[in-house]
Image: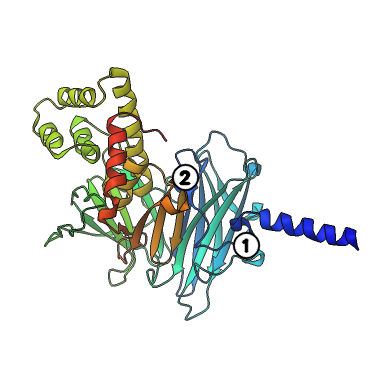
Amino acid sequence: MMQKNLLVRIFFLLIISLPIQSLAQKSLSNINQALRYSRYSRLGLKIIPVQISETQFKVQFIAEKIEENPEYNAYSFSYALLDSYDIPIEPEDTQLFGPADLVFDTDRHWVFEKTITIDEGKEQLMVLFTALDTRQGDEYYYHIDLKSAFVESHPTFGAYYANEVPFDQNYLNSGEALLFKTTQGPTLHSFFYPRNFDVPYPPMETKPAPVPRELEVVDQGDFLENVPKQLDQLGYYFFQQDTAEASGLLLKTTHEAFPKVKDWDEMVEMVTYISTRKEHEDLLAASDKKKALDEYWLKLTRNPETAKELIREYFRQVEFANILFTDFKEGWKTDKGMVYIVMGPPQEVTFSLDREIWSYQGIGESSKIRFTFARVKNILTPHYYTLNRSRAYQPVWFKNISQWRSGKMAF
């Protein structure tokens, strides 16, 4: 009897010593998706749905190979269909991808495909794509709303690379071409917006940003599917099958160097986040931008080697922001891009239906810094978020800017 009681006590001690997170069931709202934005991720996941009918979707699951020559067997890929962000993810909800589901294995991508049918009248369904790195135990996640209050329908067509792999970027360098394939009809319609956007206000600026009274749009008319379409202009395109529908495909077109910085003028624009107003005005007014920038960096660091490292690190952050957050704006000009550049990649990323929360570690749980991005319903993209601004961000924001200016930031 004593031995039995001892075993019970040992089991109880083991249970209470486990981290709370390991006892809680996973849900879409509590899994940490920080690897989605990490600079050291080995994979980049994406889900691209193509609507076939009111209740049927061709869902393409794309895993971009970021590490060099990865082994397929090093990963385990799966997906789950979830009725909400908050319900527990049960084992029976998760379906492993098998060899028959792998439709492409190229130098850059693994692509899986599933046809998903939902119940008629269903108002909410989420799709979660998971990749488990079996070598280290890292879990990569990506999810979309197949149907929700923010997403009523999806395009009935998709964009593809020349090798017919689904196009998984948020941008296309101008002059390049894509292939479009539809499930309904032989033509698509193209709109072009030549707008350039201002940089966002900092997180502690609570006044609303100015909204343009007019938005220039060029109706480019119809074009044929299955014929490579070259996109030559800088701005953003919006493609639709039916212009009466509330869904389409947004594509930002960029200069040839994007996501990297193109020239000294663009570099001057981009240093606004760590510059004083006077410094930035002087840089904008300088006739010799390269000389002005050289003087700017040396004045900040007072050390040529530190200046070089600061330049590399800052524009590496800009590059990642462009890759990760470009929508109709360049990634570095979005709210997420701004926070990412100044604060670095978040340690925790969680999603709810109407928000995304980034957390940065403090000394303890109570000192965590959290940035909340509110989801906004937008016809151009189902993934549009704006930062909930607050004056409470001012101390940590200025602290990080000071670290940047002294060359002490490292991620």
Seen at 46% across and 51% down, the residue is 348
x and y, in percent, of residue 107 in the image? 52, 38
Q: Residues within 10 Å of mark 1 (few under 14, many from 20)?
A: some
Question: Left or right: where does residue 136 sit relative to residue 220?
Answer: right
Q: Is residue 343 above or below residue 225?
A: above
Foreground of the two, 312 or 226 = 312
Q: As shown in the figure, which amino acid type bears the numbered disc 2?
A: Asn
x and y, in percent, of residue 249 in the image? 34, 59
Q: As shown in the figure, which amino acid type bears the numbered disc 1?
A: Thr
Tell me the tag on residue 94: 1
Q: Would you name the residue on which mark 2 appears?
A: 163
Q: Name, please, the residue furthest toward the right.
A: 1
Q: Residues within 10 Å of mark 2 (few under 14, many from 20)?
A: few
Seen at 37% across and 59% down, the residue is 383
Quadrant assignment, res 50? bottom left
Foreground of the two, 117 or 143 = 143
Question: Left or right: where does residue 187 sit relative to residue 273?
Answer: right
Q: Nearer the viewer, mark 1 or mark 2?
A: 1
Foreground of the two, 396 or 335 = 396
Instruction: For mark 1, give the secondary structure.
Output: strand
Alpha-carbon span between mark 1 and mark 2: 30 Å
Question: Left or right: where does residue 71 sit relative to residue 236?
Answer: right
Q: Name, please, the residue furthest toward the top.
A: 304
Query: Dividing the image into 4 quarters, which one contains the C terminus?
Result: top left
Query: Dividing the image into 4 quarters, which one contains the N terminus?
Result: bottom right
Question: Left or right: where does residue 72 sit relative to residue 290?
Answer: right
x and y, in percent, of residue 245 in the image? 31, 71
